[in-house]
Image (cartoon, rainbow, N blue to C red):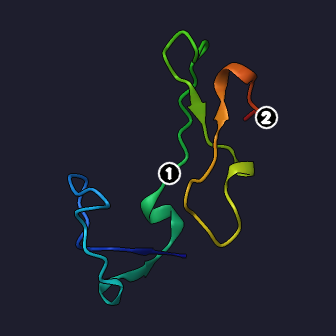
């Protein structure tokens, strides 16, 4: 499960947002994220430079701290 901050909006930067964790509630990961099944034949030509794979997500830490370069090839297939 993750914690959602009901005070945050898509227009609020991290610097502007006052962290009030006592107002957060537990939610399931699927409530705040979804699997994209969109496929792009040539992501580099489309201007996509980075991807996030399972190897970039640490257990118990859903913050994205690393990513891969599309030009280097991806490590996954679906």
What kind of element bears circle 2? loop
In the image, 58: left or right of 19? right
Residue extending farthest to the top is: 45
- Left or right: 35 in relation to 9: right
Which residue is pictured at 68% across the width and 19% down the height?
A: 71
| Sequence-first disc among 2 and 1 | 1
63 to the left or right of 26: right
The N terminus lies in quadrant: bottom right
Quadrant, the C terminus: top right
**C-alpha separation, residue under disc 2 versus residue under disc 1:** 20 Å
Element class at badge 1: loop
- Are there few (<14), some (14-19), or many (20+) residues within 10 Å of tag 1? few
Q: Nearer the viewer, residue 12 or 37?
A: 12
Q: How many marks?
A: 2
Location of residue 23 with respect to 50 vertically, above or below: below
Q: At 60% across and 35% down in the image, what residue appears?
A: 51
Measured from the top left, where is residue 43 in percent x and y? 57, 18
Mark whose residue sits in front, 2 or 1: 2
Give neighbour class at mark 2: few <14, some 14-19, many 20+ (Cα, 10 Å): few
- Label of residue 75 in the image: 2
Picture residue at 66% right of the left edge, 29% below the top? 69
Q: Position of residue 9 (x, y in %)?
A: 23, 60
Q: Position of residue 35 (x, y in %)?
A: 55, 46
Q: Position of residue 72 (x, y in %)?
A: 74, 23
The foreground one among 70 and 33 is 70
Q: Which mark is residue 34?
A: 1
Which circle marks residue 74 in the picture?
none
- Determine the residue located farthest toward the front in the rendered image: 15
Q: Relative to 78, say whether 6 is above or below.
A: below
Residue 73, compared with residue 37, is above or below; it is above
Determine which quarter of the picture holds residue 76: top right
Q: Please, which residue is most extreme toward the right here? A: 75
């Amino acid at each position: 499960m993750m914690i959602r901050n009901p005070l945050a909006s898509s227009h609020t930067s991290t610097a502007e947002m006052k962290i009030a964790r006592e107002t957060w509630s537990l939610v399931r990961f699927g409530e705040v994220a979804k699997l994209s099944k969109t496929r792009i034949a040539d992501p580099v030509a489309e201007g996509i430079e980075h991807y996030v794979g399972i190897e970039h997500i640490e257990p118990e830490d859903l913050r994205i701290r690393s990513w891969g370069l599309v030009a280097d090839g991806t490590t996954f297939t679906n």
